[in-house]
Amino acid sequence: MSGRPARVAALADAAIALLAEGGMRVLTHRAVDARAGVPLGTTSAYLRTRQALIEAVVRRLVDLERADLADRELPTEAPSAGRTPRLTPADLDQLAVATAEVLDRWLTTGRDRTLARYACLLEAVHRPELRRILAHGTVLREQARALLADAGAPDPRRQGDQFVAFVDGLLFDRLVGAGALSAPPPGTAESREDLRAAVRALLRAFTGA
C-alpha cells in the first residue's frame, strides 16, 4: 500500500485510536492530524467532511477484520440439494476454536478497533446519512450463511445472520456489558475456552451437529 491509500489508512488508524479513547466527541480533523503526527490540514485535505472521515474509519475496520479472518476461513461453497454437508462436526469444532481466537483478539490487541466500530455504529443510529456504513457488515453475514449452508443448517440465510448477531452480542457483552465483570479475563486460555464453548453451542443449535 502506498500513496493516497496508505495515507488514508494511516489517518483512519489515528481516528480509530481517538474513537477508542474518547468516542465520537473527540473525533475532529485537527485531532486526527495531531494523533497521526501530520501537518495541520492534512486530514481535511484527504477526507473533507466528518462523514467522509467516519466512512474511511469503517472501511479501514472492515479491511482489518477481513485480514484477521483470512487465515481462519473454511470452505464456503454451499452443498447441492440432497448432498451430504461437507463440514463435519470436527470442522465445526475447529470453526468454534478459530472464532473464539478471533473474538479474544478483538477483546485484547484489537480492542481499540472494536470500540471504534461500536462508536461508528451508534453514530449511524442518530445520523441517517451514515446508515450506509452498516452495509459493510454484510461481508461477515454472507460468510456465515455459506458456512452454515455447508454445515447442513436448514435455513442458512436466516441462521447465518443470527449467528453473526449472537457472536457480535457476545463480543459486546464481554467488552462493555455485564459480561466484563464475570467472564474470564481476555487474552487468557480460560477466555478463549469460554468463548469456544459458547460458539460451539450456537453452531450445534443451528446444525444439530
Image (spheres, rainbow, N blue to C red):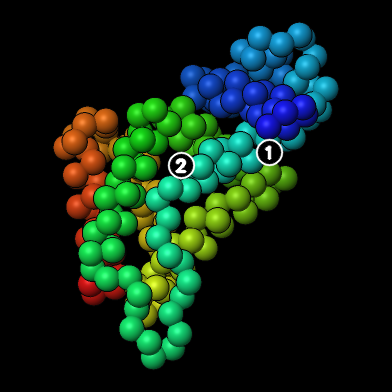
Asked if the residue under mark 2 is in contact with the one under mark 1, i.e. CB atoms within 8 Å, the reply is no
Tell me: residue 44, above or below residue 201. above
In the image, 35: left or right of 95? Answer: right
Residue 44 position within the rendered picture, expressed as x and y whole percent measured from the top left: 79, 22
Q: Residues within 10 Å of mark 1 (few under 14, many from 20)?
A: some
What's the residue at 27%, 56% (across, down)? Answer: 94
Single out the mark in the foreground, 1 or 2.
2
Please state, as top left, top right, bottom left or bottom right, where the N terminus lies in the image.
Answer: top right
Q: Secondary structure at mark 2?
A: helix
**What amino acid does circle 1 point to?**
Glu
Nearest to the observer: residue 95 or residue 49: 95
**Label 2 Cα neighbours within 10 Å, binned few <14 / some 14-19 / many ≥20:** some
> What's the mark number on residue 68?
2
Q: Is residue 173 visible?
A: no
Q: Which mark is residue 55?
A: 1
139 vs 120: above or below? below
Which image quadrant is residue 56 in? top right
Kind of residue at disc 2: Asp
Q: Nearer the viewer, residue 11 or 122?
A: 11
C-alpha span from label 1 to label 2: 20 Å
Q: Residue at x 40, y 50 (%)?
A: 72
Task: Name which residue lies at 62% across and 54% down.
Answer: 135
Q: Specify whether residue 208 is in view.
A: yes
